[in-house]
Image (spheres, helix red, strand yellow):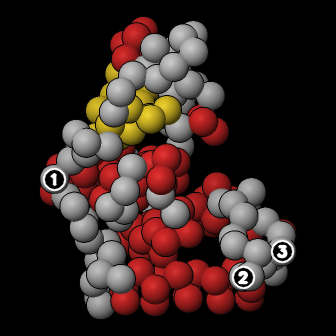
Amino acid sequence: MDLSRLRSLCQALGGGLVEMTEEEFDRTFMVGSQKEPVGLTHAPFTDRNLGVDWEGKRVLYSTRWGVHWPDLIHEMAHIFASVVSPAKSDEWSFFGWEYAMCLYLGGDLGVWKEAQQSYLPPTKVALKAFGSLSSEQQQAILDERLAAAKAAGLVAEDGTPLAIR
């Protein structure tokens, strides 16, 4: 997926998508330090190349090892589809927003689903990772999460993802 589309969408939603050099990213996120800078959250699963400035509504990334668009959409959800900071967020509450964003952008659904392989839904929904579920079970979860996102005002009835802050 063309990152300029994600960048434009972040701007339209009132935020930003910022590319940084490896050095800028490491300095900004104090890589190697025992703490993170105030207001910034490093995405732990991304091997030091993705993070969030929640207050500033920005996703920050380094192209150190390449950046995967489904990961960017996930971090965008922390910014635009949650009223609490990443450390306090309930990721299940915006999973439908992420799905809607993939559809809205015309992303390859197979690529997006592949990126969700190790995602663990709440145990009341499924007792195993998203990628271990059948296609039918995955689709049932996606349909339910999209309906929940619409009910919560995260996604318009026409499927357009919205910003709630």
Tell me if label 3 and label 2 are in contact, CB under 8 Å: no
Quick check: can you spot residue 128?
Answer: yes
Count neighbours of disc 2 (C-alpha within 10 A) and say few if under 14, some if 14 to 19, many if 20 or more: few
Q: Residue at x 53, y 43 (%)?
A: 68
Residue under the point 54% across and 11% down: 33
Foreground residue, 141 or 136? 141
Which element type, helix, strand or loop, lies under badge 2? Answer: loop
Q: What residue is shown at x 47% (from left), y 53% (from top)?
A: 88
Q: Are marks 3 and 1 in contact (CB under 8 Å)?
A: no
The percent position of residue 34, horizontal first and vertical second, equals 57, 15
Image vertical order of residue 161 relative to residue 73, above or below: below
> Does label 1 or label 2 sit earlier along the sequence?
1
Which residue position holds label 3? 127
Give the residue type at disc 1: Gly
Q: Is residue 17 visible to the viewer in this orientation of the structure?
A: no
Residue at 60% from the left image edge and 36% from the top image edge? 44
* Location of mark 2 (residue): 125
Label 1: few (<14), some or many (≥20) within 10 Å? some
Task: Tell me where residue 83 sits by quadrant.
Answer: bottom left
Judged left or right of residue 97, residue 53 is: left
> Which amino acid does the dot numbered 3 rest on?
Leu
